[in-house]
């Protein structure tokens, strides 16, 4: 398996624009996580899904952020409208079951200017 | 509240041992983890320890857990230049999936030849 695949690797956008980050988890994994990494706050869990259902979205910062998982092999994190303070590296991770290792993707570096 | 603290920087000479320390707050954490992040890459699980253990050794890595003081450490023996990276301590959040983690801000390990 190629691992967790995120796209794009880099995204530069203007303030106010909609941004969509994509993630393909490892095939067969039933948990999917979205994290955000910034210098100030480190790594924060935004939301996670189990069997495509959002379980905990308490880390989603604002209503401007939304995440979906329409099927077991695809998830999106959308920011609308984007703001400069959303600039960060966004990681997606997946795991199989409750007690197994979470594998991380390479991340998407988002810059909002 | 939930918090994981670790020092931000550590510099060692090649061949020496590195010790990275971490404190956490949630005494109910079942698992504690060490992740490694190389520049421009995602996070890689290095090792983890179950909360009822005091020590775990895996080749050059030794994890020590002092549950009373909520202190976790990672020792890397015979540190190599390839070990230069950021090391994250993380605790499992409640009883949920292993991917539902609270991370420290990371310790940047620099290994000098």
Image (spheres, coloured by chain):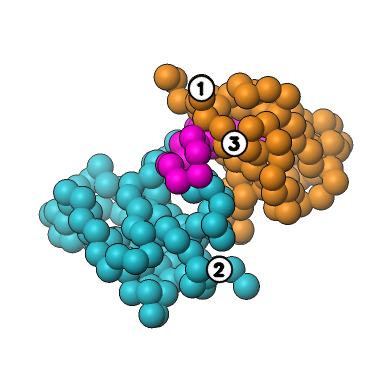
Chain colours: A orange, B cyan
Relative horizontal placement of residue A89, taking residue B20 as reference (left or right): right
Location of mark 1 (residue): A27
> Does any portion of residue A97 appear in the rendered image?
yes
Upstream in sequence: badge 3 or badge 1: 1
**Label 3 SS:** strand
Location of mark 2 (residue): B3
**Label 2 SS:** loop
**Label 1 SS:** loop
Q: Are marks 3 and 1 in contact (CB under 8 Å)?
A: no
Q: Residues within 10 Å of mark 3 (few under 14, many from 20)?
A: many
* Residue at figure coordinates x 39%, y 80% from the top left: B69
- Which label was assigned to residue A61? none
The quadrant of the picture occupied by the N terminus of chain B is bottom right
Q: Residues within 10 Å of mark 2 (few under 14, many from 20)?
A: few
Find residue A40 and report its horizontal and vertical position in percent. 61, 59
Is there one chain holding both mark 3 and mark 1? yes
Q: Which residues are magenta?
A: A92-111
Location of mark 3 (residue): A32
Q: Residue furthest bottom?
A: B68
Q: Chain of mark 2?
A: B
Q: Residues within 10 Å of mark 1 (few under 14, many from 20)?
A: some
Q: Is residue B107 magenta?
A: no
Relative horizontal placement of residue B83, taking residue B24 as reference (left or right): left
Q: Are marks 2 and 3 in contact (CB under 8 Å)?
A: no
Relative horizontal placement of residue A34, taking residue A64 as reference (left or right): left
Relative horizontal placement of residue B48, taking residue A98 as reference (left or right): left
């Amino acid at each position: 398996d190629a691992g967790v695949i995120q796209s794009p690797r880099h995204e530069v956008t203007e303030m106010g624009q909609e941004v969509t980050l994509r993630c393909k988890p490892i095939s067969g994994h039933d948990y999917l996580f979205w994290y955000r990494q910034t210098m100030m706050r480190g790594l924060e869990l935004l939301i996670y899904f189990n069997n495509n259902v959002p379980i905990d979205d308490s880390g989603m910062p604002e209503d401007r952020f939304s995440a979906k998982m329409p099927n077991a092999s695809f998830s999106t994190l959308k920011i609308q409208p984007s703001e400069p303070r959303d600039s960060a590296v966004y990681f997606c991770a997946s795991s199989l079951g409750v007690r197994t290792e979470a594998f991380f993707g390479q991340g998407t570096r988002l810059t909002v200017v | 509240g939930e918090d994981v603290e670790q020092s931000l920087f550590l510099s060692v000479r090649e061949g020496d041992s590195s010790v990275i320390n971490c404190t956490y707050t949630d005494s109910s954490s079942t698992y504690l983890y060490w992740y490694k992040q190389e520049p421009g890459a995602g996070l890689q699980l290095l090792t983890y320890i179950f909360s009822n253990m005091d020590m775990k050794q895996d080749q050059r890595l030794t994890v020590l857990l002092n549950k009373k003081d909520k202190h976790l450490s990672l020792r890397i023996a015979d540190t190599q230049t390839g070990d230069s990276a950021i090391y994250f301590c993380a605790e499992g959040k409640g009883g949920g999936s292993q991917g539902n983690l609270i991370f420290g801000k990371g310790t940047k390990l620099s290994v000098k030849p």
